[in-house]
Amino acid sequence: MFRTAIDFLLALAGVLFFLPVMLLVALAVRLTSPGPVLYRQTRVGRHGATFTLPKFRSIQANAEQTTGAVWAPR
């Protein structure tokens, strides 16, 4: 129980510490391109359990709509 409390407090401190940075990233995403700031991605975790992970969008919405999927240039 002590370890769980320490883990929770450290996670809370990390969120509070990085909150200004996350707000600046959200603002930058919003100002530079249309579309949602966050998107949800489903991942598979331990023992096959699925969970949803919110992520900042780092690519424009429908970026490959006209060209289809393409490999990144080297």
Image (spheres, helix red, strand yellow):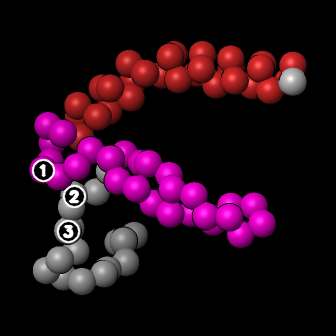
Instruction: Tell me if residue 41 is in the magenta stretch.
Output: yes
Per the rendering, the mark at residue 13 is: none
Q: CA distance from mark 2 to mark 1?
A: 7 Å
Left or right: residue 10 compared with residue 58: right
Q: Amino acid at mark 3?
A: Asn
- Whole-number angstrom distance, CA of label 2 to CA of label 3: 6 Å
Residue position for label 2:
60
Residue 34: mark in rendering? 1
Q: Residue at x 21, y 67 (%)?
A: 63
Q: Amino acid at mark 2?
A: Gln
Whether 67 is among the magenta residues is no
**Classed neighbour count for the residue bearing mark 1: other residues with Cα under 10 Å, few (<14), some (14–19), many (≥20):** few
Q: Label 2, secondary structure: give it.
A: loop
Q: Quadrant of the N terminus?
A: top right
Mark 3 Cα-neighbour bin, 10 Å: few <14, some 14–19, many ≥20 = few
Q: CA distance from mark 1 to mark 3?
A: 10 Å
The magenta stretch is: 30-56
Give residue 64's quadrant in the image.
Answer: bottom left
Q: Residue at x 44, y 48 (%)?
A: 54
Q: SS of the residue at dot 3?
A: loop
